[in-house]
Amino acid sequence: MATLEIKDLHASVTTDEGAKEILKGVNLTVNSGEIHAIMGPNGSGKSTLSYAIAGHPKYHVTSGEVLLDGENVLEMSVDERARAGLFLAMQYPVEVPGVSMSNFLRTAATAVRGDAPKLRHWVKEVKDEMTKLEISGEFADRSVNEGFSGGEKKRHEILQMALLKPKFAVLDETDSGLDVDALRVVSQSVNEVAEATDIGVMLITHYTRILKHIQPDVVHVFAGGKIVESGGKDLADDLEENGYVKYIGKPEPAKL
Amino acid sequence: MTVAENNVATAAEAVIPAASRAERFTGYDVEAFEVPGGREENWRFTPMKRLRGLHNGTAVADGAVTVDVDATTDVKVEVVGREDERLGIAGAPSDRVSAQAYSSFTEATVVTVPADTKPEKSTLVRVTGPGEGKTAYGHLQLRVEAFGNASIVLDHVGSGTYADNVEFVVGEGAKLTVVSVQDWADDAVHVSEQHLWLGKDATLKHTVVTLGGDLVRVSPTARFAEAGGDVEMLGLYFADAGQHQEHRLFVDHAVPHCRSNVMYKGALQGDGARSVWIGDVLIRAAAEATETYELNRNLVLTEGARADSVPNLEIETGEIEGAGHASATGRFDDEQLFYLQSRGIAEDQARRLVVRGFFHEILMKIDVPEVRERLEAAIEAELEAIETETATA
Ligand SMILES: Nc1ncnc2c1ncn2[C@@H]1O[C@H](COP(=O)(O)OP(=O)(O)OP(=O)(O)O)[C@@H](O)[C@H]1O
Ligand SMILES: [Mg+2]
């Protein structure tokens, strides 16, 4: 059983006009096996929260804590965080030209596991996960994310999660840009990983449609740089119905 | 990285230089050239002081390079005097240093792959510098006669100051793959004009790799004698602290139905690391159905390094197949680094992956296995240096 605790987290981004505070006191505890859905209007700081947890150099934590089983995550480098068991499926995965997907996956797995996986097992493992996600084998030889469609990028983020088996994963709008079939296979993979590894998940989304496939234990409303309300699945339905108007003071219906 | 890609129309209006490349003076006699001061278009990026007098006549030859050729028996190797009539046919020097080299060399090495011959293995031509503090001038001609097919590695090692002209003469229907490696010691200054001459339906793949030296300036010029020529010009350079690496290309399309494809990529790291890339492509009125593309990319790995990149595309006929260019200089991409690190890959390894990835495209095109392996090793060695630099930073 592992715990990820976010305590009164404040973070800012450096802009041309100086530092701009985006996270304004985020409090959240996620335990192994739990799925937390996080919903909130555009620009409220959801991706910033994900990046701050992962350690993106553009975002500066000004106060607060992120603890993984009591260990201070904020003192770790980006790669140390990943090796400690944190994973971020990015809203906009980055293209890395000239680095093949297969080389990348193996290098990452070697780093996270501490040993190079045995080649024969590894090939099968990757192939199995790719099959589940309905990713064709030719992607192994392509450069990381280069020229991938939006949906293909998202599938590959989940492929990486399945192979790296983190303790906690933040899925930042993994469902955006997925067609109906892709949404189903991606959700299935997430559920399988959840069952097999007892992973804790923070699922950032604008849509309740993914919550029909992945059952959240808790739903949080994220607005103005912090969590403003938490509840059960019915909170998501309420958001879909009424939007975020009561949290941000102006009408902005959640997209269907 | 910001990328400027242009199609014919925008390229034509965007990049016509002040003076047409067609008007650049060329000649074999050094006295016909004025001594450059450093502001000329041709010299404005070169630190003149570091030329050690190659440009103004004060660099007197007091040494000689050693040229070793390792070739199969079907390849002919000759050392000839200045009077040999074959010399100079691939083109005349286009700057004063090359003309100085042409006016000063005493003997030339001519390597000939005879007609219809395909040697079993690649020929190695190794040029060793005159030694620290010494100056030399040289001349080389590498010929592949009609329908021959060869691969040549031209390797530059050692110390000293050296200016030369290298001629690549590719006969009718012949194929030549050549890699010129500048792997000089830290003190070396090398100024080289490389004249690429393609006969009817000839194919030439010319690769320049610059790693070592204090100042290296290589100017490859490609000319087509008749229709059907196909030249691919590739380059890879890695400039470290204090190094000046300059590559000035000129592709002169003067006859119809020829192709040229240029791809140069460079990485720079360390204080005062400097690279210059000039890509002049001229499509003259007669050069109908020309197909050309040129690309230069630079990756600036650390503060204090600087890359200049100037593509010039001049088009004098509307009847072309296609023409385009792209040039981009980018700093090391932190987003790529973050992405790789967020998957557990340590920073130094992530950096190496990104730089290797950057060069991958060009390494894949170098089809002389010995050279590719050596380059991979050389890039690894450069990357080790990044690691120590960032570790101590
Ligand atoms: N590098 C940056 N420079 C300037 N502003 C930034 C930067 N990164 C984020 N911001 C701003 O911070 C705010 C929060 O952005 P963030 O991407 O975290 O929102 P989000 O909740 O993920 O939105 P969405 O639902 O659209 O993905 C936005 O107003 C955004 O413009
Ligand atoms: Mg976002």
Image (cartoon, rainbow, N blue to C red):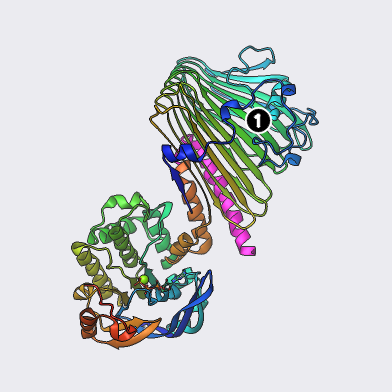
- Image quarter for residue B147? top left
Q: Quadrant of residue A224?
A: bottom left
Span shown in magenta: B364-393
Q: In this view, does B145 lie above or below B378?
A: above
- Asked whether B344 falls inside the magenta stretch, the response is no
| Subunit bearing disc 1 | B
Dot 1 alpha-carbon crowd within 10 angstroms: few under 14, some 14 to 19, many 20 or more: some
Q: Residue B281 at x, y = what percent? A: 51, 32
Pick the front one: B14 or A218: B14
Above or below B353: residue B97 = above
Quadrant containing the C terminus of chain A is bottom left
| Residue type at tag 1 | Val
Q: Toward the viewer: B357 or B233?
A: B233
Query: Ligand 1 is located in which of the four quadrants?
Result: bottom left
Where residue B317 sits in the image (x, y, percent)?
44, 27
Residue B88, image x and y in percent?
Answer: 62, 18
Which residue is found at the position 50% from the left and 69% from the top?
Answer: A57
Q: Is residue B185 visible?
A: no
**Mark 1 falls on what kind of element?**
strand
* Residue pointed to by mark 1: B127
Please say if B287 is above or below A43.
Answer: above
Instruction: Estimate the x, y position of residue B1 in percent, counting from the top left.
Output: 48, 54
Residue B198 in view: yes
Residue B384 falls inside the magenta stretch: yes
Would you say B25 lies left or right of B104 here? left
Depicted B219 relative to depicted A84: above or below: above
Front in this rendered view, residue A249 or A160: A249
Q: Residue at (22%, 83%) from the top-left corner?
A: A238
Q: In the rendered picture of this protein, how many numbered marks are placed on residues?
A: 1
